[in-house]
Amino acid sequence: MAVVRLVSDFRAVDAQPPAAHAGILSRTFCAWMPAMDTKHQLSLLTVVEGEREEEPPRQRNARRSAATDFHPCTDAQYQLFSTFLGAAPEELSNVLQLYDSIPKFSVSARRQALMRNAKGGLEPFDHSFVHHEIVNGVRESRTCRIQLHPAMVKRDAGWIHVFPSVDEELVSEVLLKFFSDANHGEHSSEKRESTVYFTLRGVARELQARGKTRSLVQIRQSIEILAQTHMRLFVGDLKKPVYDANLLADVARVEARQVEVDPDATWAVRLPVLVSEAVNQLRYRQINFVKLLELSSPLARWLYRRLSVSYFNASLAHPYSIRFAAVQRDSALLDHSRFSSNRSLLEKALDELVHARMLLSWHIIETMKEGRRFVDLRYSLQAHPDFVAEMKAANARSRGVCLHAVPPAPRG
């Protein structure tokens, strides 16, 4: 099958969708991962003639405990998206190269309190960042701008404006994990539509298992905030946004009074078209979902996603270099007024990655000052052998995805 060239054409969001309707995954990816041992080969979730092979009962029961099972979708690109390479595929998910680089969950509760006007309202959040993407092994960068319009939610004191923050990030990550399992989602490459099915109890169990316990009411409120938050994304010099819609669409939800009574009711949510485009255009990478959610700080999770997308040549011989200013600009999470406070946050996040065995070590290799004042720092990050193994598996999976992908049809 033809190899798809991954072209970073953000204008494709408003163009005709690719017709992706051919090709079934080969029985395993052993052909493109010959060095993989038998244990890893047998653990890979494979697709044969549009159906999933039977899983061992223990793995199947563990997977089904998180959400309700649905009939698997036979869309070829979606099957690639939901097939992982690793010893424990049920722990893996996807990081989307564009969508997950957007700092849509960066406005913390502390920051929102400072942004409120005299009437307690919030103006739209506007922030510029640089999106980095690996295309055919070459790093490409584009300047982007996000404009977030807050959701309106009801609290004890009345209706207030709220931006999505940590809770919404965690819930969104769980929904993407469920969508990455073909038994819990539907995708149409032709229509560019992606839907995830779940239950509130399923989301709550997944969060609790990762040490991020949230109540059913909190989860439901996070879904409502995501559904009401409007995002506009501008890329480069384009005057019109390439995305102009809410973070979630077409939410089929139960009434508030039913949350405690029926937490197993099925919810259906249509995901943003940017997610659908990532599936269609193969703009995603494999990531360890369990490790991601077990990280405690939003900045540590942002760094893990960034490394999973960018540090594809991770090895003991190739450290990763990153600047403080780049982290501050692209994550929008270093929002304190003092440089020292932001530096402390970043270095604590790096320490957390060391503790989580993602980094072996880190150190500062360059300092930039204006007079006696620090203005920037350059860090060198040394990958842990565990992370190196993760990236090798992710690289092999990406090669297999390209080999089995359906080439995009010419756009009209």
Image (spheres, rainbow, N blue to C red):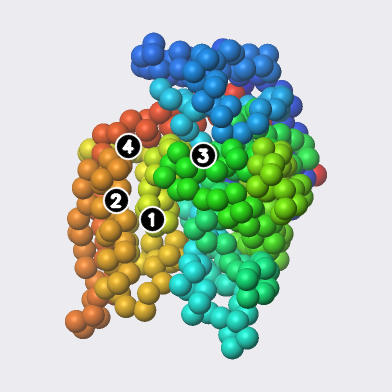
Distance of label 1 from label 3 (alpha carbons): 18 Å
Numbered disc 1: secondary structure: loop
Residues marked 1 and 4 touching at CB (< 8 Å)? no
Cα distance in 3D space between marks 1 and 4 = 19 Å
Give the class, few, some or many, for how many residues have Cα within 10 Å of label 3's Cα (few <14, many ≥20).
Answer: many
Q: Which residue, given by chain and number where applicable, does mark 4 sit on?
A: 387
Type of residue at label 1?
Answer: Ser
Q: Which of 239 and 187 is in front in this view?
A: 187
Q: Mark 2 points at which residue?
A: 352
What separation in Å lies between label 3 and label 4 (alpha carbons)?
23 Å
For marks 1 and 2, the one nearer the N-term is 1
- Mark 1 and mark 4 lie on one chain; the one further toward the N terminus is 1
Specify whether residue 50 is in view: yes
* Towards the viewer: 100 or 392: 100
- Identify which amino acid the numbered label 4 is placed on: Phe
User: Mark 2: which amino acid?
Assistant: Glu
Q: Name the residue under label 3.
A: 206
Asked if the residues shown at circle 1 and circle 2 are in contact, with their CB atoms under 8 angstroms apart, the answer is yes
